[in-house]
Each structure stands twice: as structure tokens, then as C-alpha cells.
Image (spheres, helix red, strand yellow):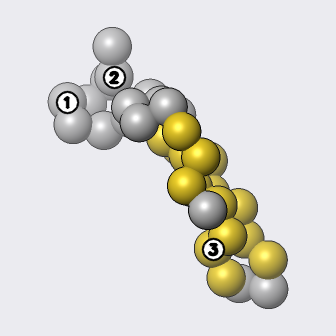
Amino acid sequence: MSPMPGLPEFVLVGYVDEQEFVHYDSDRKEMIP
């Protein structure tokens, strides 16, 4: 269970040259390019 309701337990965001290129959170369980 998430420590705060409505927030995912894990979030990953990838950046190249200060531009976000990938996003993942544990609620959606999928990578979003």
C-alpha cells in the first residue's frame, strides 16, 4: 500500500538533455515513452 493515498509507491522518470523520454509508475505498471 502506498504511504500516501493517491500516490504511486514507485516512480521512474528518464531524462536526456533535460527532456523527459520515459515515465513509469507502480500504479499503471507500464512504461510510457
Circle 2 sits in a helix, a strand or a loop, which is it? loop
User: Which residue extends farthest left?
Assistant: 5
Who comes first in sequence, dot 1 or dot 3?
A: 1
Who comes first in sequence, dot 2 or dot 3?
A: 2
* Near-viewer residue (1 or 27): 27
Q: Amino acid at mark 3?
A: Glu
- Asked if the residue under mark 2 is in contact with the one under mark 1, i.e. CB atoms within 8 Å, the reply is yes
C-alpha distance separating marks 1 and 3: 25 Å
Residue 12 locus on image (x, y percent): 61, 47
For the residues carrying marks 2 and 3, which lies nearer the camera in this image?
3
Which residue carries the number 1 mark? 5
Residue, x 63% and y 73% (percent of image)?
Answer: 20
Which residue carries the number 3 mark? 20
Q: Amino acid at mark 2?
A: Ser
Circle 1 sits in a helix, a strand or a loop, which is it? loop
Which residue carries the number 2 mark? 2
* Near-viewer residue (18 or 22): 22
Residue, x 21% and y 37% (percent of image)?
Answer: 6
Circle 3 sits in a helix, a strand or a loop, which is it? strand
Quadrant of the image containing the C terminus: bottom right
Quadrant of the image containing the N terminus: top left
Residue 7 locus on image (x, y percent): 30, 38
